[in-house]
Image (tube, grey):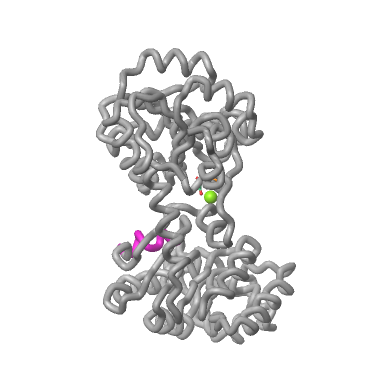
Amino acid sequence: MKNLKNYNIKDKKILFRADLNVPFIDGVITDTSRIQAIKSSIEILISNKNKIFLMAHFGRPKGEIVEKYSLNFILPSLKETLNLDKVYFLDKFDHDSVEKIINEMQAGNLCLIENIRFLKEEENIDLNFAKKISSLFDVYVNDAFSASHRNHTSITGFPKFLPAVAGNHMMLEINSINSFLNNTKKPNMAIVGGSKISTKIQLLNNMIEQFSAVAIGGAMANTFLLANNYLVGKSLVEKNLIQEANNIQLKAAKFNCELLLPVDVVCGKNIHDTNPIHRKIDEVLPKEMILDIGEASKQSINNKIINSKMVLWNGPVGAFEFKPYDNATNAIANTIKLNAKKLNINTLAGGGDTVSAIKNTHAEDGFDYISNAGGAFLEWLEGNESPGVKSLKENNLI
Ligand code: 3PG
Ligand code: MG
């Protein structure tokens, strides 16, 4: 795969796919790591006097112009992070508008294109559009690992018409995740949380084959508890997936993978209830909701972590956005922070919520690598190489 280390790009016009889908809450970007992520690639391309067009999405406007999803808001942060005085902004991504602005730009300038998902051509994979736009550029760079699981024009369309190159962050994500997955040391454990088992069935099936232990937390654990005939009151649960939960448990037994399910929980009347009640797993009342794993369950995950050689983490084990139901998730982050280096445990984490929890507890130091990808991280762990990475590998226009 061509990348910025083995392929030199100088004095060219570049179409650059970034993932600028940053968390933006009440007018504030709460995490700039996706902007930081492209810095290394952009700096090289600027110093080599290329004209760079940044192409990215924000939210899911689905082919319509939706003002609140305009990428305009990111310009100040982009300039600051990349140390640039000026960044051009292109609000109409068509042949003539691109051509006009290319002529205005100097070598080494950067232009941000308005939210690519304002265009129907993005999700419809419009190859005529891709071809026409590509005629104005020399090279396509993809530095958006976290968006490369989407089969969209900006990910898989342009590499059909332009020499395609992986950016530095793309390479870092692929190499870091693969190096963790390909260098197995046993015993190893995966911690899988989140609200829905439906989104993680494939992941669990894959993890069971590769890990000595899989700890399951978050609301997805409730479906397993129900499958094991425990009453879960008003908790979130996916009743239609009870059979699936049973299949996963049978498969775990077959592969000798220890499944750690909660043995005690923390309940509230709802997520805003600040008077949590600890319950053994067979004591949950009909009016209660399970919102975190309990003390004993937390201890058993923490013990398993310190006795493992590798730990993979995806998904919080409780409703961590609502205090005090962040307790067990924070405790896991802290256990990893305090022990990983000391005990030589290899650690990998990813997924938006998991990364937030790690940042909230300042536990970054405990991780060998933290992926800034959500869905793309999950799909990679399921064993699927993303369409964007395939497009880069298959590109033969260089
Ligand atoms: C993400 O935030 O995970 C990526 O930017 C992909 O966004 P999407 O799930 O809307 O495709
Ligand atoms: Mg997402």
Q: Is residue 170 above or below residue 65?
A: below
Say which residue appears at 49% left-offset and 69% top-offset.
318
Residue 133 coordinates in the image, percent (x, y): 54, 23
Query: Viewer-proximal residue, 307 or 156?
Result: 156
Q: Is residue 166 above or below residue 107?
A: below
| In magenta stretch: residue 361 | yes
Say which residue appears at 56% left-offset and 46% top-offset.
390
| In magenta stretch: residue 169 | no
Say which residue appears at 35% left-offset and 75% top-offset.
345
Can residue 231 be seen from the camera position used here?
Answer: no
Q: Which residues are magenta?
A: 354-362
**How many badges with numbers are in the image?**
0
Residue 230 coordinates in the image, percent (x, y): 66, 82
Q: Quadrant of residue 330?
A: bottom left
Q: Quadrant of residue 15?
A: top left
Q: Quadrant of residue 209?
A: bottom right
Residue 324 coordinates in the image, percent (x, y): 42, 69
Q: Is residue 372 above or below residue 114?
A: below
Can residue 177 be seen from the camera position used here?
Answer: yes
Looking at the magenta stretch, what is its main secondary structure? helix
Say which residue appears at 38% left-offset and 28% top-offset.
52
Residue 232 coordinates in the image, percent (x, y): 64, 77
